[in-house]
Amino acid sequence: MKFASFIVQGRTSYGVVEGDQVIDLESVKSTFGTDLKQAIAANRLGELTQAILAPLPRVALADVTFLPVIANPGKVLCIGINYATHVRETGRQMPTYPMIFTRFADSQVAHLQPIIRPKASHKLDFEGELAVVIGKPARHVNAVDALDYVAGYACYNDGSVRDWQKHTIQFVPGKNFPNTGGFGPWLVTQDELGDPQDLELTTRLNGEVMQHTRTSDMIFDVRQLIEYCSTFTELAPGDVIVSGTTGGVGAFREPPVWMKPGDTVEVEISGIGILRNSIADEQ
């Protein structure tokens, strides 16, 4: 199944995406959860049979305002330098352990909403990535069992303010400007997507392909990332691991390519869909 978070008729809801419509779960929130994060934590999404869904109202996707897939994650753990192609373009050595930095939930922006170029910098870069949403409490998970802890996957654009990212060896400032992390368009459940290491990922800027890879190029795969992260922290339902980007980012092009107002950036992952954002200046 595909699950989206959205606003419709002035209220916040979530629902099941079918084609160009979404089945609004507003009327069954008392049973399944008030938002998608709570519904994942309740572990009841698998009970949404056609008998339950059939009488529920359907809304055209064109009539909803998308929210980030998980609007209020407790943790967003981002993985740096996790594709071999990206390691080569940066000139770094292959990492021994995952490089991890954090994003704040309020730095995220939804599908079809603008990514904001901040007043502080024009060096706003794109990073197409696979987002992994945790489905149940996970601590000291073995890699072999790790996918059992996944609720599903989404597209992510880890929009990066490069000069602020490079002020020190810590990435956090350049990764947390408001409305720079695109997250959407929806969550595709683990059972529907299948092997997360056999996906095609493409980033386009104004229709031009900037990044193209398969997730098999990850240095630390999804299973390994869950094992590593769950060792130093307990992962909770709705937490997000953003699994890293491939080569082709704007900062390492000659000349560099920065996103600017009026641009459109898309992150497409096979089996999931297309996350699309425009670029606008901070007001």
Image (spheres, rainbow, N blue to C red):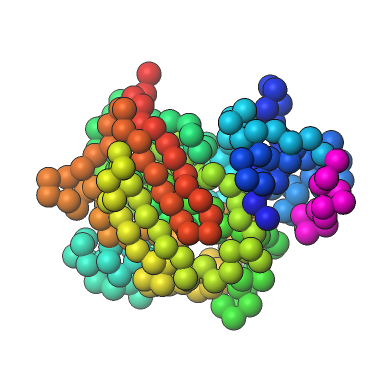
Residue 42 or 229: which is nearer the viewer?
A: 42
Q: Quadrant of residue 82?
A: bottom left
Query: Which image quadrant: the C terminus?
Result: top left
**Res 5 visible:** no
Q: Residue furthest left?
A: 255
Image point 61% across, 35% down: which residue? 61
Q: Which residues are magenta?
A: 43-55
Image point 42% across, 63% down: which residue? 200
Residue 98 or 132: which is nearer the viewer?
A: 132
Query: Which image quadrant: the N terminus?
Result: bottom right
x and y percentages locating residue 274 in the rendered image: 47, 47
x and y percentages locating residue 42 in the rendered image: 79, 54
Image point 34% across, 24% down: which residue? 281
x and y percentages locating residue 44 in the rendered image: 80, 56
**Magenta segment includes 219:** no
Image point 52% across, 68% down: which residue? 196
x and y percentages locating residue 96 in the rendered image: 35, 75
Q: Quadrant of residue 201?
A: bottom left
Left or right of 252 in this view: 10: right
**Res 132 visible:** yes
Work out whether 96 lies above or below 211: below
Q: Residue furthest top?
A: 283
Work out whether 81 lies above or below 279: below
